[in-house]
Each structure stands twice: as C-alpha cells, then as structure tokens.
Amino acid sequence: MRKLLYCILICNLLFMLSALSILTHTSRVVHAATFQAAISSTTLGRGDNGKVSSWTNAHYFTHHGPPISIEFTFDDGPNPIYTPLILHILARYNIHATFFTIGRQVQSYPSLVRQEHQQGDVVGNHSWNHPDLTRLTPQAIHTQLQATSVAIQRATGASPLFFRPPYGSTNAQVRRVASQLGLQQILWTIDTRDWQRPGVNQIVHTVLTQATNGCIILMHDGGGNRSQTVQALPLIITGLLQRGFTFTIV
C-alpha cells in the first residue's frame, strides 16, 4: 500500500514539472513572437526585402581611446521626397551633416535648402546641373559654380564655403576656379555607392566596416530613388554610435 502511494506521489510530481515546463516554454514563445511583431511593425531600420537587418542586433561596447569622429555628406539634392526624411532622421539623433546641392534643385526647392541651413547643417555647392567639370572651359566651370552659390545664398542668406565636384572629377583648373569663388573642395573617404541601390544591408556594411577616425561618408539624398539610403541611415548611425563615434561637419 505504501509503495502504491509513493508511486502516485511521484507520478503527480512528474506531471506538475512537465506542465510547468510546457507553460514556461509557451510563455517564451509568446514573448518572442510579440517582440518580433513589434520590430517588424517599424519602418525605419528594415533591411532588404522588408526584413529586419542583423545590424539592429549589434552589441554595444565602450570606446576607451581618444575621441573618434566621422562626417555624413549627402549629394545631388535637395529632393522633395528623400531630403525631408533624411533631415528628420538627422534631427532625431541630433546629428548635423553637409549637403552638397545641385543649383537647379536649389532653385526649385529653396525651402528645403533653407531647412538644412536652419537645422545647423552645412549647405555646399555641387554645380548647377552635375556635369564633369574637368571637361568644361574655365568660364563654364565658373558659371556652374557661381550660379549655384547665388542660388544657395538666396535660399539661406549665406554663401557656401565648400564645393564637391560631380563624380569627384577634379583637376588643377577646377580647383583654381573654385578658389577664385571662395570655395574649398571637399571629396570623401567612404563611398557607399548607394546610388547603385545595392541593398540596405550592403550600404550599412560598407560604412561600418570602413569607418575610421576622420572619415567622410558619401551618400545621396537626390538624383534618383534614395529609399535604401533613408532606410540605411538610422542603422548606420546606431552602429557608429555603438562604436564610439561622434559626428562632425566641415
């Protein structure tokens, strides 16, 4: 009789332990599903094909060395769709950038250029209509840059101090004409090639694997579909912050 009672007691105990294990596992599954649904509902921070990027799972670490800085630059804007989105992201993280603007775009969307300036971003000169300046005469180079500087000054109240030659194509003649107009040439050290639309994850990967102190990142807010750039930007910012970077402007 005593052995029978022991057997019943042991069976009940095993049943309770099994039930507890099932409940715990079910709870974990529910929490994991809820967490995944919350992530999937976000718009910014998605990777390619709407999938949540693996970069969002990067681990934080503390930077113990000297300060390290990096700079965002955006070319070919302003664009009425993508420039406001990029400005919103930068403002959300309290980061400033340099926008190298196309003169005819400045003329078409002066309020966007004014917003860049008012947010504390730098507005630079990227020529009037994006030609290869090295193929132009000195007078034509002068016209391209001067007309753009005038458009920027009208939109912001301040003349630009920096320019970036389209395609990065430059020579002594281009730099000489720019210098005569009070413009300093700024190129880049990290080319995201976002204009090729290689995928959000690839854009993020390019920056986070090449970033070093003092780098200048080339991205685009105009000149085509820049939705991948917009999606990649918060992931890049988060990844750089995790690595101890601060953000500067020229």
Image: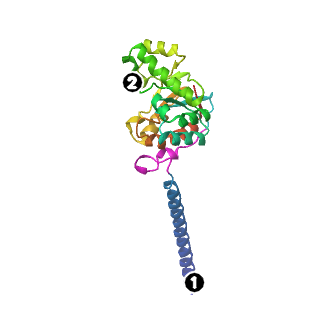
Report the quarter where the C terminus lies: top right
Residue 112 location, quadrant: top right
Q: Position of residue 86 (x, y in %)?
A: 52, 40
Residues 95 and 215: in front is 95
- The residue sitting at 54% across, 74% down in the picture is 14
The verdict on residue 133 being magenta is: no
| Residue at mark 2 | 131
- The residue sitting at 55% across, 37% down in the picture is 111
What secondary structure is found at the residue carrying circle 1? Answer: helix
Q: Position of residue 46 (x, y in %)?
A: 47, 48
Residue 173 location, quadrant: top left
Q: Which of the marked residues, 2 or 1, is nearer the chain's N terminus?
A: 1
Residue 171 location, quadrant: top left
Residues 30 and 237: in front is 237
Residue 102 in sight from this viewpoint: no
| Above or below for 40 versus 183 | below
What secondary structure is found at the residue carrying circle 2? Answer: loop
- The residue sitting at 53% across, 68% down in the picture is 21
Residues 249 and 6: in front is 249
The verdict on residue 46 being magenta is: yes
Dot 2 amino acid type:
Pro
| Residue at mark 1 | 5
For residue 135, the mark is none
Residue 16 in sight from this viewpoint: yes
Q: CA distance from mark 2 to mark 1?
A: 93 Å
Dot 1 amino acid type:
Leu
Q: Position of residue 83 (x, y in %)?
A: 50, 39
Q: Position of residue 102 (x, y in %)?
A: 46, 29
| Above or below for 88 versus 181 | below
What residue range appears in magenta?
43-61
Residues 208 and 110: in front is 110
